[in-house]
Image: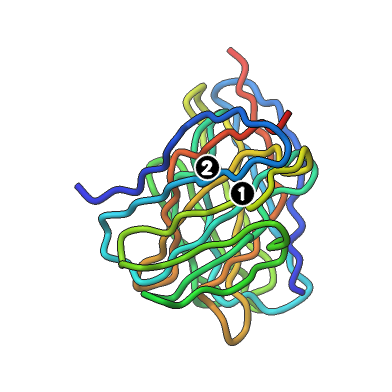
Amino acid sequence: DAEITQSPRHKITETGRQVTLACHQTWNHNNMFWYRQDLGHGLRLIHYSYGVQDTNKGEVSDGYSVSRSNTEDLPLTLESAASSQTSVYFCASSGAYNEQFFGPGTRLTVL
Amino acid sequence: SQELEQSPQSLIVQEGKNLTINCTSSKTLYGLYWYKQKYGEGLIFLMMLQKGGEEKSHEKITAKLDEKKQQSSLHITASQPSHAGIYLCGAGRTGTASKLTFGTGTRLQVTL
């Protein structure tokens, strides 16, 4: 069965370190998305991609970057982790009717 | 930007009772998507509505999109403990329907 996976599931890092969160989907979807979920803010879009070599900024993109070298993967990089980036991160890919399928999430703590 | 308001923010119901969750937008919705999230887990896609007046059901959950495509409701009949979780609505935006805006969610607890 097709699926979307994220790794690691939990990560603790220190302020200033570079962190990369992995996202891999086997749906063969062109569209992929990264969100963060925080209490009081709901889901907020960080970056998204409509295909290989395409990346776009979402509403909360500062301090984050993505790259898309193949259809299956969209890694999210925090260039210099900050405590404000402590959150739960979700990756998603969307199908023909724009319904999004989500990964299990990565809980990131920045100390 | 298109914002989605969900109501209520939280809900506690007794097992067997019916309940309704609402999702309202100030602008026309281009695709309305309902999701369920259990604590510590990802979002599970429930159903999608696209046409004004559309109604879909899956097991004991029914979702409707009003004629003006500005409000959707999610109705659960005879609630069970397995229905507990956070329900979120997501909506497509004009011109970029693939990007979704999400409501802040409704937390549902089902008591025995």
Residue placed most toward the observer, A88 or B74: A88
> Neighbour class for label 1 at 10 Å: few (<14), some, many (≥20)?
many
Q: Are marks 1 and 2 in contact (CB under 8 Å)?
A: yes
In the picture shown, does residue A27 fall above or below B31?
above
The residue under label 2 is: B36
**Earlier residue among tags 1 and 2:** 2
The residue under label 1 is: B88
Specify the amino acid type for callout 1: Leu
In the picture shown, does residue A89 fall above or below B100?
above
* Mark 2 secondary-structure assignment: strand
User: Which quadrant of the figure has residue B107?
Assistant: top right
- Which residue does the image show at 56% across and 71% down from the upper left? B99
Residue B9 image offset from top left, x and y in percent = 77, 41
Specify the amino acid type for callout 2: Lys
- Which residue does the image show at 54% across and 78% down from the upper left? B97
In this figure, what is the number of numbered marks? 2
Residue A32 image offset from top left, x and y in percent = 44, 64
Q: Are marks 1 and 2 on the same chain?
A: yes
Residue A36 image offset from top left, x and y in percent = 64, 49
In the picture shown, does residue A35 fall above or below B69?
above
